[in-house]
Amino acid sequence: MEEKALTVSQLSIYIKQIFDAEEMLYNIKVLGEISGLTIVRGVAYFTLKDENATLSCVCFDTSDFSFLNGDNVIVTGTPRYYVKGGKLNFNVVKVSKYGIGELYQKFLELKNKLEKKGYFDKSSKIQQPHDIKRVGVVTSKEGAVIQDIINVGTRRNPFIDIVLYPVKVQGVNAEREIAKGITVLDNYNVDVIIVARGGGSLEDLEPFNTEIVADAVHNCSKFIVSAVGHETDYTICDFCSDLRAPTPSAAAELIFDNIEEKIDDYKQYILRLKQSIKDFYLDKQQNFFDIYKSLYVSYKSLNEKYKNTFCNCLIKFSHSVKLVFESKKHKLEVLSSMLNKLNPKEVLKLGYASVKKNNLKVSSVKSLNINDELKLSFIDGNIKAKVLEIEGEKNGI
């Protein structure tokens, strides 16, 4: 004889009827901290939490909803069980503030402590370097953040190397990995360090609001950019860094110079330099002719006794002027040659190639493995290649 079983629908309807029939659950008040708040098409979805439990909430009237993650609130409403989704939600009809959330309170206390220690002083900030060749990034190796930085950075300047130190950006011991990543890159050959992650709740961003990360950022000797969360998110890491970027993509925009704009600037500089030297030459040439004419008149009026001496002086004067112009011309040629060497395309013309793996610059065989796929960029095009053999010592960093 088969044992009788309830269907999923029967059980779900039964659970719903229990909640609907319990009058004591109508319009009750619940105290907790707002977390994971999102507002979609005028409907607020959030989690109400305390130390031991969480409750999914939904509020359909957000006309007066002005609350944020971390706020301690008292919500009034009724729990509803939705049969189709198999989920219990607390339908909120009223929200009132009740003090400050625990996480936000810890954030404010640490912020106040570090501010008194001088961690946020502008005088301790490092100036952004001008000649950036390598950028270190502390973030997760997975997800959109590192790809956004690579895509924006290589589009603006493909000749700047990107070095990733992969870390957890949330969860247990994430703050220790982030702090270690900053310290390691501070002692590595990078010019700038970007600390980055995507947006999230106050809990998600908690590792970046810790004292161990603040110490690592404050003690870093390299220029450090904080690109944590969305534009409206602020963390302790932001306040301690030398520069805050509203998003990881914005950090890449701020750090990676546009190579095309830089080349245009060099061209304009050369044109201005040539015009300045030309103007200088024409001005001095006119002065020379005026002086020469004056001297010639004086020469004609001299006695024969002094004519030879005067003539020799005039020849020496002409020779000196010629040397000045030749010196200026040589200086222009040297400067033009130096500026031309700064053009990365000139390097490729010499027969060199730019090697990349997964859109990252390859500068050593140490970062390659057998069967890795590579992209080789020459002055007139690109080719794809595969690593068949590696010669030389290969040790990891």
Image (spheres, rainbow, N blue to C red):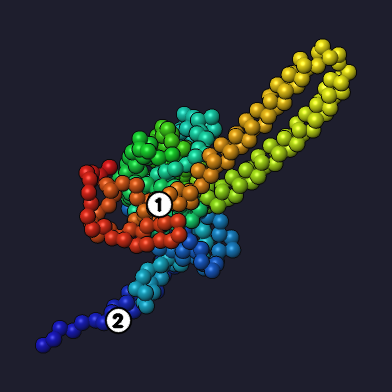
Residue placed farthest to the left in the image?
1
The amino acid pointed to by label 2 is Gln
Q: Residue at x 34, y 50 (%)?
A: 362
Q: Is residue 166 visible?
A: yes
Q: Which residue is mark 2?
A: 10
Give me the C-alpha separation between circle 1 and circle 2.
75 Å
Front residue of 396/104: it is 396
Q: Give x and y (percent) for residue 393.
A: 22, 44
Q: Give x and y (percent) for residue 311.
A: 77, 20
Element under disc 2: helix
Front residue of 363/38: it is 363
The amino acid pointed to by label 1 is Gly
Q: Is residue 77 visible?
A: no
Front residue of 321/191: it is 321
Element under disc 1: loop
Precedes in sequence: disc 1 or disc 2: 2
Indicate whether 349 appears above or below 383: above
Horizontal side, residue 365 vs residue 274: left or right: left
Q: Where, quadrant-wise, is the N terminus in this rendering?
A: bottom left
Q: Residue at x 39, y 50 (%)?
A: 352
Q: Residue at x 72, y 23 (%)?
A: 315
Q: Give x and y (percent) for residue 160.
A: 44, 47
Front residue of 204/246: it is 246
Indicate whether 272 appears above or below 125: below
Q: Which residue is mark 1?
A: 351
Which of pointers 1 and 2 indicates the residue nearer the eye? 1
